[in-house]
Amino acid sequence: MESPPRSSVIIIGAGVSGLSAAKVLAENGIGDLLILEASDRIGGRIRKEMFGDVSVELGAGWIAGVGGKESNPVWEIAAKLGIRTCFSDYSNARYNIYDRSGKIFPSGIAADSYNKALGSAIQKLKGLESNNVEDATNRMDCSLTPKTPIELAIDFILHDFEMAEVEPISTYVDFGEREFLVADERGYEYLLYKMAEEFLFTSEGKILDNRLQLNKVVRELQHSRNGVTVKTEDGCVYEADYVILSASIGVLQSDLISFRPPLPRWKTEAIEKCEVMVYTKIFLKFPYKFWPCGPGKEFFIYAHERRGYYTFWQHMENAYPGSNILVVTLTNDESKRVESQSDEETMKEAMVVLRDMYGPEIPDATDILVPRWWNNRFQRCSYSNYPMISNNQVINDIKAPVGRIFFTGEHTSERFNGYVHGGHLAEPLLALASTQADAVSSLHKCDAPAQLYLSGKLGIPEVIL
Ligand SMILES: Cc1cc2nc3c(=O)[nH]c(=O)nc-3n(C[C@H](O)[C@H](O)[C@H](O)COP(=O)(O)OP(=O)(O)OC[C@H]3O[C@@H](n4cnc5c(N)ncnc54)[C@H](O)[C@@H]3O)c2cc1C
């Protein structure tokens, strides 16, 4: 087999971070780049699918961080392309908490449980800030431990759903606290096609440029002072001066890609330290609506004695009126559990929960869609989740290059990890490549970028509750 010509840079992965990196390189005159993508499409964790005649987002759904003093670059691109979005108002979710007999908790009880969960979260953070695990444990006041279904539900929302982030949350501080759901038939991924169009040859909405190679699963990176040899699962071998690896933190933690020589210990230890979040949106289609719609009803919560059990719900009527679709979000262990069972079993479980809330007469769902991010060997997570009080060294080590291999991806963004804009902006190394001549040499010269981000004040945002 004829070996392909040596490239200046091979980019592994065609999600938002890989494509952003490639675009910056192309804009800086590095034309001989090659993008190797394991799956048969671009987009990575930005992925739409048709479900019940509408386009739903299995991965990233929201443009988070809008309306602040600075403009979120992803929001700017979406606005320029006329992407249809819907404002998500989470503030009423606390008034829509159902118990197992279908009663909505009075707002006073919900407020008390919320304050208790907040107190417990603040205590935990204070303990963690003192950097002493024993102290953190001692500080935990047992009376604040969530026990009842409503307390467990609120605790789940506070800790697992949106707020497992280092404070203050840079996305909200920099870009604003509003979140908009992408509700566009072209999907969130349309942004990426448009981005690719700016530097790859396309025709009639298709990317026809052979610098993007799909179905190329990278299995080995052999690196030396002279360059990098990239081997793919189908037996192809590629040579490059540099590699930019954008695979997720979950993939880095797996054995999908081996390194020769192996990555140094400081690197592998940092990769292991980053927690991964699995976040699963399950879509259910119904013959008709049986849930309340109208103002303040879009998000609702189910309180069960098992923490995180089908807790957080959303109806899609604001996004797609008449679609008769509900979405329930599971995380981590619950996500892994439903990923390993059949969709029929998951549908049965969800129907029991819905009948608890809305009574036995409601119709069965006619269709279900369960994404499997954890079991996807090209993802192995939904996004990175640095510990609440994280050591800056961890992220610096995760994003630091090793020889000629550079790392990008949402998990390398110190300020915006976990978000699409984190992936989009996670090219601090590439941003240095400001002139055509300097581009590749800048890549080589620079060490781990010293971006300073120190967790400052303590506090929990009230995005959802
Ligand atoms: C369920 C879910 C909900 C989310 N919700 C939001 C949200 O509402 N708002 C938000 O801003 N963000 C959200 N995110 C996070 C957001 O989607 C990610 O931060 C972002 O898309 C990550 O982009 P990336 O380029 O870093 O990684 P990816 O998109 O994962 O791109 C990496 C690419 O590398 C490829 N790859 C992996 N291994 C190999 C290999 N060995 N060889 C070749 N290619 C390989 C993968 O196939 C993939 O295409 C969500 C994510 C998920 C999964």
Image (cartoon, rainbow, N blue to C red):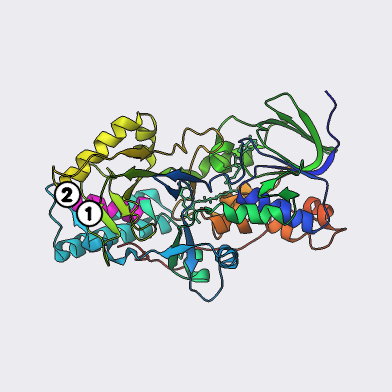
Q: Residues within 10 Å of mark 2 (few under 14, many from 20)?
A: some
**Disc sitting over residue 291 in the figure:** 1
Residue furthest bottom as drawn? 69
**Quadrant of image for the C terminus:** bottom left
Please tell me in which quadrant of the rendered image residue 93 appears. Answer: bottom left
Q: Image height check: is 70 above or below 34? A: below
Report whether residue 305 is seen. no
Residue range (magenta): 148-160
Circle nearer the N terminus (1, 2): 1
Q: Main secondary structure of the magenta part?
A: helix
Q: Are marks 1 and 2 in contact (CB under 8 Å)?
A: yes
Percent x, y of residue 299: 30, 58
* Residue at left offset 48%, top offset 73%: 67
* Residue at left offset 70%, top offset 54%: 197
* Residue at left offset 56%, top offset 63%: 78
Q: Image height check: is 76 above or below 348? A: below
| Amino acid type, residue under disc 1 in the picture | Trp
Relative to 454, is 125 on the left or the right?
left
Percent x, y of residue 115: 24, 64
**Disc sitting over residue 33 in the figure:** none
Question: Under tag 1, what secondary structure?
Answer: loop
Percent x, y of residue 446: 76, 55
Percent x, y of residue 82: 55, 65
User: Is residue 135 in the magenta section?
Assistant: no
**Quadrant of image for the N terminus:** top right
| Amino acid type, residue under disc 2 in the picture | Tyr
Reading the image, the residue beneath label 2 is 358
Near-viewer residue (154 or 91): 91
Report whether residue 104 is seen. yes
Relative to 131, is 287 on the left or the right?
left
